[in-house]
Image (cartoon, rainbow, N blue to C red):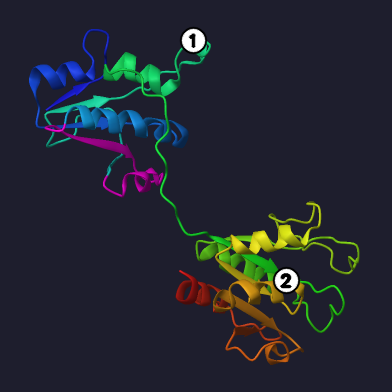
Amino acid sequence: MKLITSYAGKKVVDYLILEKPKKVCLIFWHGLGDVIMFLSPLSELRALFPGTQIDIALQDGVGQEVLFKDDAILIDSPNEAIEGYDYTFQIHFPMSEHLNGAYTKQGWCCVQELGIDPVDDYTELPNYKSKLVACHFQATALPDPVNPSEETAEQIWNEILEAGFIPIEAFFQHKYYNPVNAKFGFVDCTIRRAKPSITSLISLYQHCAASISVGSGNFHISMAIMPERTLYLEKEFLVKCYTKQDIATVDINNYEKGKVKEWLNTKVL
């Protein structure tokens, strides 16, 4: 069980060729961008040495293990050999910016540390379900019987975050913008500054995991795209005024804390 930290004399492949270890681990204690760049060199190294189990160790608590189908080893220090492996290699992933484009960073690591031909491409990342939740809290024509209080809207916004989703205010300030509908102070992700466009609004909803909306144009867009993932914020106008479908609703006159979080966890995840 040895920890290798220098590659001035021998590269990783030299150990694999000469020693023929059964199991080795590469410690990769770096940021997200470096990890993504390292995916292709790691895949190439594994392909060149199919008889050796080549694992990777990452910093615990960062979440990078999802890029490796959750089979990466999580560690608290990069400076110790990992038990159960013949060799542990500390990969420094040296910078290549000073080479002015002669090598990419991943290619430079291949040459300087791994000892293989430069690998410069990117591994395609897997697709994941969207975590965006489109929020529309304010109606243009009849705000009073429709809009929630800022306190209730903020509670809903926070519950979206607590459920692990990403709230985005899907509110365009179009030609008939009602000044009453000023942005709530807690909203920190919005499309208000974007050029108003119906096609843009539709495309946003098409890429969202869910929609939470008062009775407005946005609600009807949502119903036409994902009725099963639409939550109607009900105040004075009942949802059955707009649809006979069985749509989830919450009462924003007397909002019961936790309802939006519960809905997201049971109906959307």
Q: Is residue 227 above or below residue 69?
A: below
Image coordinates for residue 121, horizontal then vertical, percent? 42, 29
Element type where label 2 sits in the image? helix
Residue 125 visible to an observer of this rendering? yes
Give the residue at mark 2. 218
Instruction: Specify whether residue 57 is painted magenta.
Output: yes
Q: Residue at x 13, y 19 (%)?
A: 17
Q: How many marks?
A: 2
- Residue drawn at point x = 53 percent, y = 73 percent: 261
Observer able to see residue 168: no
Q: Is residue 151 magenta?
A: no
Range of magenta residues: 50-71
Is 50 in front, or is 15?
A: 50
The image quarter containing residue 250 is bottom right
Q: How far across and down, in percent of the image, does residue 75 sit?
A: 28, 39
**Residue 99 numbered tag:** 1
Closer to the camera in the image, 144 or 60: 144
Q: Is residue 148 above or below residue 81?
A: below
Give residue 147's position: percent from left, percent from top. Answer: 78, 77
* Label disc, if present, on residue 269 of the rendered structure: none
Residue 21 lies in quadrant: top left
